Amino acid sequence: MKIAFKLFASLSDYLPAGSRDNRIELDVDEGVSVAEMIRRYQVPERSAHLVLVNGLFVPPAERSRRRLQEGDEVAVWPPIAGG
Amino acid sequence: MGWNRKILRVDLAGGTCREEPLNMEWAQEYLGSRGLATKYLVSEIDPRVDPLSPDNKMIMATGPLTGTMASTGGRYTVVTKGPLTGAIACSNSGGFFGAEMKFAGWDMIIFEGRAPKPVYLHVENDRAELRDASHLWGKSCWETEETIKHELQDPLVRISSIGRAGENQVYYACIVNDLHRAAGRSGVGAVMGSKNLKAVALRGTKGVSGIRDFGEFMQATNAAKKVLADNAVTGQGLPKYGTQVLMNVINEIGALPTRNHRDVQFEDAGKISAEAMHEKRPSDGKPQLVTNAACFGCTIACGRISEIDKGHFTVKNNPKYWGASGGLEYEAAWALGAANGVGDLEALQYANLLCNEQGMDPISFGATVGAAMELYEMGVLTQEQIGLEAPFGSAAALAKLAEMTALGEGFGKEIGLGSKRLCTKCGHPELSMTVKGQEFPAYDSRGIQGMGLAYATSNRGACHLRGYTVASEVLGIPVKTDPHVTEGKAELVKAFQDATAVFDSAGICVFTSFAWTLADVQPQLAAACEGDWSMDKLNAVGERIWNMERQFNNAAGFTAKDDNLPPRLTSEPAKTGPAKGMVNHLDRMLPEYYQVRGWTPEGVPKPETLSRLGL
Ligand code: SF4
């Protein structure tokens, strides 16, 4: 199934070279979890602070339980803030 | 004591400057800066005064931590009655000006009346005098700063000034210090302009004395700095990406107001984000961002210094904009960009430079352009009226309107009215995305429910810096709450509002609150200031300040009806993203908020609330 995986701010370094707009489109196995995706790209767990699937927050405790579905967009940020 | 115990009172009509002792009883109740200056203002002016008349006063104030070694202790505030809103106005700025006021030996400067002709105030330690500013009138903030430094033969003098926008009384004119820091919101620059006061130039060589216990203060400030350094947000995120890092986050959660809040997601958000500012441009191979920058004493350094693309259509024949200068911060990038549907990063930086140069609030300016573009697309405003085509997304229109507004030319005069006056004039007040006449900042309250309540009840009109529940609802600071629910938001908003009043009044930057709680600020204040500065006391001070501001607004004629949101946000559901189908449910939160505050259902503080707070 196809999903989009997006890493922002300092985490963009973990995307493969040549990725554009902070995102990659991926073909992944059915049932892959959010946590597995984060691990696959070697994003340190403590840096994966704000994790959104389709714009909705996934709390740390739910990341290994949360299975992705076709068309999902996963977006991850380190701890950030603004004003 | 962290105070100098000295006020400078400037009678602009009479041309005199007088020293007064600071009211130390009030300092114990209202701390400093925002709180203490507001106490002076509400005690000295009629709440119904015309903000642009000589009877309004304007106060520039520091807090007890301003100018000290406390991190971010460079802040000062401008307190007055605001022309954009008719409510209390309190605009906060960083840079170096606030610290310099402290070094010169003053806690605050109160300006009264109107000068018969343009003047500027020059303060050198104890000496203060009004000087002729006829030669400065018509100059930009940048030219004013350069000219004053030259004529005083002092490159170290710190200057706050108004540009053409303040002179022309653009309703959202700001006061710019240190070239690109601004007391930005509510039109404090128009008040300064109405007083014929062009600039304030300060030079202080006294340093800060009178810290209550210096050893304890060193310890407390060092411990607090370590908290900032160790925190991933204040230690790494903000210095590297600035506030602009929020552009993609807020777009992703579907709360990025786009095209005058018609939409909640902007297809070009990535192009105007912090990440884009780091990317090399194809045109010259350089990123827009040159470096980060810090205000006085700040160990976070979130400021952005950027260089515009010299070949961009806005500046290619205008080298004066080619150097490195301030911007883009998140709010400016949003208001000049997403709010108008403009995805051209260089055009945003150009408009931002004009805002800094001539002293306009980019939030209110950008949002007013957004309203004008919607009116244009509806056919209510025409090309003939505006003098150009102004559809959403037009970078050319944004750039031209920024020039026209900054210089007070043509349709720029109408944009200078702000969105409420403009939309009302055009027969469509419902299209003005404002609360109490002030334009929203960069968060759509359909996707962040608590912000709807924070905006509706903000004492200075729509504002994110009076109660930034985004920290909790989106970023998880200090704890994550669900942005889509209304439950618990009344308490959350109150807690943010009261705590922010303390941060502001202490003289430090509210961005420290991404790592600090009041418990980190308390030991610093307790070591700097004489008196009881316990947590209980600080909580009471914050709540007292909030209620004092509310009482001023109520006396100025505001009622519960003004604690409201535009109908678009409460009746037009978000079209896309995770908040699709949602509106803001202010009606569910507001009655509870009044209750939590100890106010009547009409939004008036109850007598027992006032007596509990000593008001
Ligand atoms: S955090 Fe940013 S705005 Fe606040 S004082 Fe530091 S540099 Fe200035």
Image: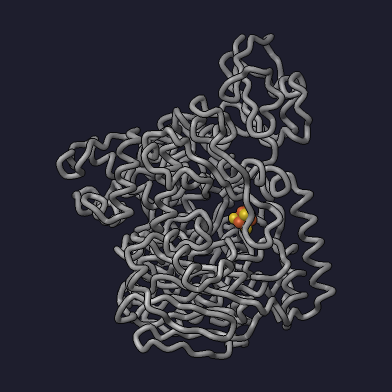
- Ligand 1's quadrant is bottom right
Q: Nearer the viewer, residue A83 or A32?
A: A83
Q: Nearer the viewer, residue B441 or B600?
A: B441
In percent of width and height, residue B168 lies at 29, 63
What colour scheme was applied to this rendering of the protein? Answer: one colour
Residue B206: tell me if it is visible. Answer: yes
Relative horizontal placement of residue B225, taking residue B128 as reference (left or right): right
Relative horizontal placement of residue B215, taking residue B384 as reference (left or right): right
Residue B592: tell me if it is visible. Answer: no
In percent of width and height, residue B329 lies at 53, 46
Residue displayed at 75% across by 79% down: B211
Where residue B513 sits, quadrant-wise, is bottom right
Q: Nearer the viewer, residue B416 or B231?
A: B416
Q: Nearer the viewer, residue B84 or B547?
A: B84
In percent of width and height, residue B269 lies at 48, 32
Relative horizontal placement of residue B524, taking residue B146 as reference (left or right): right
**Is B305 drawn above or below residue B55 in the view shown?**
above
In percent of width and height, residue B500 lies at 59, 62
**Is B491 drawn above or below residue B247 in the view shown?**
below
Residue displayed at 70% across by 59% down: B517
Which quadrant, please, contains the N terminus of chain B? bottom right
Residue displayed at 56% across by 16% down: A71
Where residue B528 sits, quadrant-wise, is bottom right
